[in-house]
Amino acid sequence: MSILYPLMALGFLAVGVPIWLHLRRRDESNLVEFSTLRFLDDQPIAKARPMWPQNWPLLLLRMLALLLLVAAFAWPYVENQNTVIVDESRVYLLDNTLSHQVDDSFQAARDAIATELAANDQRTQIAVIELATTARTLVRFGDDPVVAADTVRQLEPSAERGNFVDAFRSAAEMLDTSLGTKQHIVLFSDSQANQWAMRETAIPFLQSNTEVSLPTPLETAPANLSLSDPMARRTERDGRPGLEASVTLTRQAASPQFTASQQAPQKFSVAFLDRGREVFRQDVTLEPKANTTIESGTVVAEWEADADQWVLGEVIVEAAVDASAGDASDALVGDNLVVFSLPPQRAGRVELITESLFLRRALDPQVMQSRWEMQISDPSAMADRQGETPPDVLCVDGQSLLSAQVRNAVRNDLSSGRGVMLMVDEATPLVIGFLRELGIELPPDQPTSITPATFRYLFAEHPVFAPFQSAEMGNLEEIEFLNYRRLKVRDANPLAFSASGDPLMFESILGPGRMLVFAFAFERRDTNWPIHPTFIPFLDKCLEYLRGQSISVAGYEPGESVAWELPPGSIAEEITVSRLDPTTGKIDPRAQGSVRIPVVNRTANFLASPRPGHYGIQYSKGEQIDAVLDVNPSPLESELRYDFTPAAVASWTQSDDGRRFDSESPADAFQLAESEALQQPYGWYFILAALAAFVTESVYGAAASRKANQ
Amino acid sequence: MAVRQHERLIDRFDPKVMSLLLSLDLKARYIVEGFLHGLHKSPFHGISVEFSEYRDYQPGDDLRHLDWQLYARSNRLCIKKYTQETNVRIYLVIDTSGSMNYRGGDAWASKLEVAKAVSAAMTSLALRQNDAVGLLTLDELAQGSEFIRPSQKPSQFGIMLGHLQQIHSAGGPRLAELLQHMLRLIHRRSVILFFSDLLEDAEGIREAFQQLRFLGHECLVFQTLDRDELEFPFEQSSVFKDLETQERRTIDPNTARDRYLKRFESFQQEYRDLFQSLEVPHCVLRTDQEPWQALSLFLHERQRLM
């Protein structure tokens, strides 16, 4: 070992420092610093300062402190009978998504990992990461093996959808601080193809020396039957309330073999249940298509339903047992049930202060039947509302805003948490001033002619537009706008834009009440919407939204992040989420407790349950359910197609240039020392002892100095 | 009478008070005020401009100088003309060799601090007389000189104080070097107040002082010394370390004192002879005594030069 070796040089420095410090800090007594010795040059020259320690206790204390520091950092390298050399650091990634429940694969993997943990000989570090919606660390390196095995055994299968890249990244981070010379990631998963397809372009994060073990390839992908996309809406037929629901049935044949039996038409039975009671059943035959192994179809059901209570619906699919029909096997049972819900129907009240004949006709009792009650008011003779029950939604146009009573009504309704629907068809100074008060700028110099426009950009996820993502509700792209006002918003969210980029519809965010602002009037001079089939459904959705009523099924996937916004008029500091019994509509007593979530800025953020089903949301204590959250598995989990040679792993792995360890370089010795020192508690005791020695030395030195000065 | 006045001056000077005053400004005020309070007659002459003659007013003349009374009496517009009193340019030159750092047990400050305080006091006095005051010293590392051009502005006092406070002494003997700087920088006839302990060979600086005198400068030497240097009152045998050369010698003061005092007196006599031959006033400024003798010498010489 050369003296130029960095550690050797540091060692020499460490030995020399305390001696130098000691001699440097030695007190010099009986010394007189005089201005000049030119008149004393006949006196004997003083001996040089004795370079020999005079205060042995101080020197010993200083050397002891340094020795302790050296011992602290050397301790991880000292082998004794308790020293364990870790050969391998291994991270198990346990896929706990729905697709991994095929043939009880999850349970088998879980038990295998638990057995491995219990039998571990400590020469292998083992950690376990659960691959679900978010990657969760179940077992860390160094956890007690018995406790770790129990933790893994108690893991329940979930219906969540997970992400491989997050789990691999978590594993790589754990391996970065691991002790083993060999690093290993073992994936216990079905290796679903669509899971690998996610984020393939992630920045490489896996060390090149990390070994990745992927699952054993299956010879065939199993056949699967699944339900998805449940939808429901209330209807009225012959004066009686009813319900119309639909669901998508998908069948995936086994792959890659196409047997004659698989290509034969299959019969399935789809049952709709409302509060546990079967209300509809239909046998469905799926005709196989050429060159595809996936067939799907939509099943629509209709039945009478009480409009005054929540609909808690379930759809179940069963394979018809018919041996002659061919292969009707179903590998995944968890996706054979989907749930949906609808709130009780209560006729809303709309106060209409507009001359629009189309709106009056659309809200006519013959059209809206029991959904909406219309009250037409004259803006010039609008009476004070005191003593009356205010309407749920106020529908006004710009012309009516010329009346001070109407403007006051808009202000009052917004501040009271009620809804306002405003069509801007006038640009008078009074209207401009009032709109400015609402955060909307209406420039007076409006263009005289506008090229006919259509919707270009829509906030498709907004509750009023979300139902129109389904083609059954009509095509919004067919609507044309011949004339509209060019508005600028300050305190509002644009919901729709024209092709030329002009905002056509906003939602105000000013008050507790909701307000939808349209840059046009529902008149033929402005748009053809009033004569389009989407007009009445859209108007109905807008009014429902403004009223604060749940519009559509609140569907979430297991484990998905939910931002639950309190509806207007509701006040709560926290909400309670509980699993509902679909037969009674009450909180399921068998479910494991309820979850309370604080409400911040009228929004409660939480993760949806990993188990599909109905979940009731309560804004206050008691038994009343204020809203229902439906949790259904992701349709992607039903696609049982696998990729056992994923390109993603290679793209996540760093090149050799990025490797960190080289056992020959001194820098790696420090890195190893850092990681191993964290595992050696004695080292920290030595450091503490060294600090104590330094403190003692300082106190003793100060006392000795004081004594010498006296 | 002179003895009684001197006693009263001593009574008013308290070395403890001086050692407690941290600010150079306060030290200077303490010295000056105490000194002026003890004088029966102000040494100052009227520092003002003297009327010289009248001349006729011409357009563009400053109306402030118009004699209105004369105009009222004679209906003539005349401008008063004055003669500016000739003032003295004074340079404070301070030695910053390491030996100036010495402070004995009875001293109210180190030799350098005493020199700075007295310099500040003299600056204050000089500026009151409308004299221009400047400063010259070597910097701490002897890599150059600190030079402040003389000025009679009232703000000069603050500038001088600021620079005086930043002066530190270190290193070996540099008296000859300082004098060379003086010769190079000071050209016009000036009064040079020289503060040093003069702990260097007199022969080494003789030539420089001769040149200063030859150039017409008036020099006043304030030799700043400590009681320890003058009396060598040490008792205990100790190791003595030279502040300038870092040389160490083991000295028994009881045996070495007589010889020290004899050699020191001989050394002092050399300087006295030198300054006498050059007609340079020389004053020993002790760090354990009041500095008013130095101030008296300064004012006396100032009066003589007027």
Image (cartoon, coloured by chain):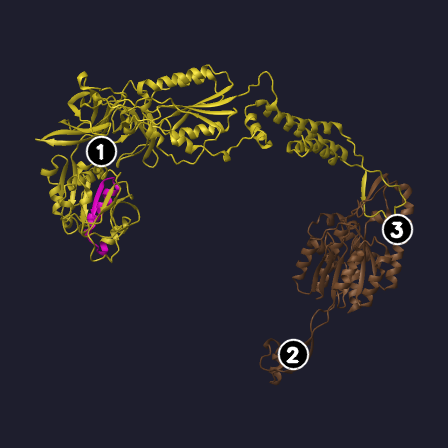
**Which residue type does callout 3 highlight?**
Phe
The residue drawn where x is 77% and y is 68% is B189
A585 relative position to B140: left or right:
left
Residues tagged 3 and 1 counted as in contact (Cβ below 8 A): no
**Chain hosting mark 2:** B
Magenta span has A406? Answer: yes
**Which residue type does callout 2 highlight?**
Lys
Chain shaded brown: B
The circle on residue B264 is 3
Residue B199 x %, y %: 83, 52
Q: Is residue A44 above or below residue B189?
A: above
The circle on residue A552 is 1
A503 relative position to B170: left or right:
left
The residue segment tinted magenta is A401-430
Residues tagged 1 and 2 counted as in contact (Cβ below 8 A): no
The earlier-in-sequence mark between 2 and 3 is 2
